[in-house]
Image: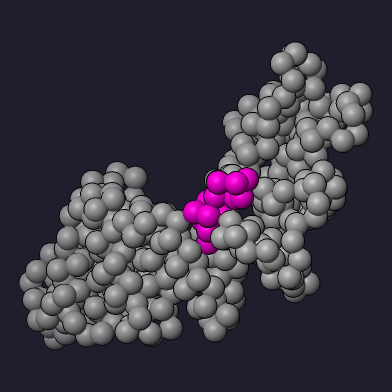
Amino acid sequence: MMPANFERPRAKSVLLLLTLSLFLKTPFAAAATKFEQFSSEAEAAYKNRNYPEAQKCFEQALKEADKLDKNDKRIATTIYNLALVFQAEGNYAEAESNMLKALDQMIYLYGAEHQRVAQVYMDLADLYVEEFGQENKPELKKKAAENYRKGIDIFEKIYAQSSGQEAGSSGESAPAGKDAGGKKGAQGKPDPQAAALDLANATRMLADFYAEDEIFNQAEPLYKRSLELEEYASGSDDKSLAKHKAKVAEFYCIQGKHKPAEPLFKEALAASEKSNGEDSIETGRILYNFGGLYYDQGSFGDAEVMFKRALKILEKDSEKNEQDLAQKSIALADVLDMEGKVEEAGSVYKKAITTLEKGEDKSVLIRGLKQYQKHYLMMNNKDEASKISARIKDLKAKGSAQQ
């Protein structure tokens, strides 16, 4: 099967910065207080990944917060931001403790069904997923799923309210005096498109969670829901939507479900070409994975067209991703072999292997050499195949010795 592997998006650092920005931009008093000074210094340190300094400054800000009214929203903000710093440092116990404190404070200040409360639930779930990656405790996965669901339930209610409905999933309206949060539209209701986008993002996070665990039957309806919401919120030609459609198509490819994957790839490609440009890197990535679908279906001619166009685009980014480009070139060479274009395939293999030889990850080189060996076996060139076999054995021996 061609590489179209599903990966949980490595967007946590972006999410942290966005979340940090969301709260740090809360309007402060005009006077330059010590609290504000420490908070500003902490934000700068965080952005520079100087986490010890950020921790120190946020803790100093909290000491100054003792002089503020206990209902001052900046206190919950600072506790929350401190949790993010602890998470970045890998101190999950302190991160959880502070995030739960901030959550309680925000529920008190904003109400249990506010957008900010929902976002904290989502980030708390992400914290448990990240911690699970380090400690492999099953209870962390359970806690993650529970918090994702809590966040989604709130976003569902906000979205329902934006559509003029009285109740969310629980059948209860927001508490008196506490709004549901989010960008406001007509008559004080949340903006429907903004609410839909929030819900789409939250739903996709839970879908990713299930997909990573290969619980595909639970991930699939969530992906469908997230795409519907995002298309409503952003329009069919949105850059983000193009990327997410391609991702869901890859999700189907993993399961061998080519029928629903193909139209999604076509839609993603058309949207990316329109919003990102026909020669954009994002379009190139979609083309490559689309080619993988055709390879899996045995449509080698279509796969060749997609791979060649993708590689031509991705070569523009080759200085940053030379090794990745070489691996993708191996896929093209394999397709050419399948079509009987062995001479062209050999040329592509040779160039790719030369690049992989320069890389540090020898396991990637070994995989490429195995494909190159098959190329010579197809040509009945046993001498060259034997040379490559010896090279593979040598690399494996050196790898074992280093371990």
Instruction: Name above or below for residue 377 compared with residue 168.
Output: below
**Residue at x 53% of width, y 58% of height:** 196
Please state the horizontal and vertical placement of residue 380, each as a whole percent of the image: 14, 86
The answer to which image quadrant residue 285 occupies is: bottom left
* Residue 359 screen position, x and y as percent: 37, 54
In the rendered image, the residue lying farthest to the front is 187
Q: Is residue 39 left or right of residue 240?
A: right
Question: Is residue 243 rendered magenta in the image?
Answer: no
- Say which quarter of the image contains residue 162: bottom right
- Whether residue 22 can be seen here: yes
- State whether the magenta stretch is mostly helix, strand or loop: helix
Q: Residue at x 17, y 79 (%)?
A: 300
Quarter of the figure with residue 65 = top right
Question: Which residue is at a point 90% across and 34% down the rendered structure image?
Answer: 70
The residue that appears at 41% across and 61% down in the rendered structure is 231
Which quarter of the rendered picture does the N terminus lie within? Answer: bottom left
- Residue closer to the observer: 220 or 186: 186
Q: What stretch is highlighted in magenta?
A: 186-201
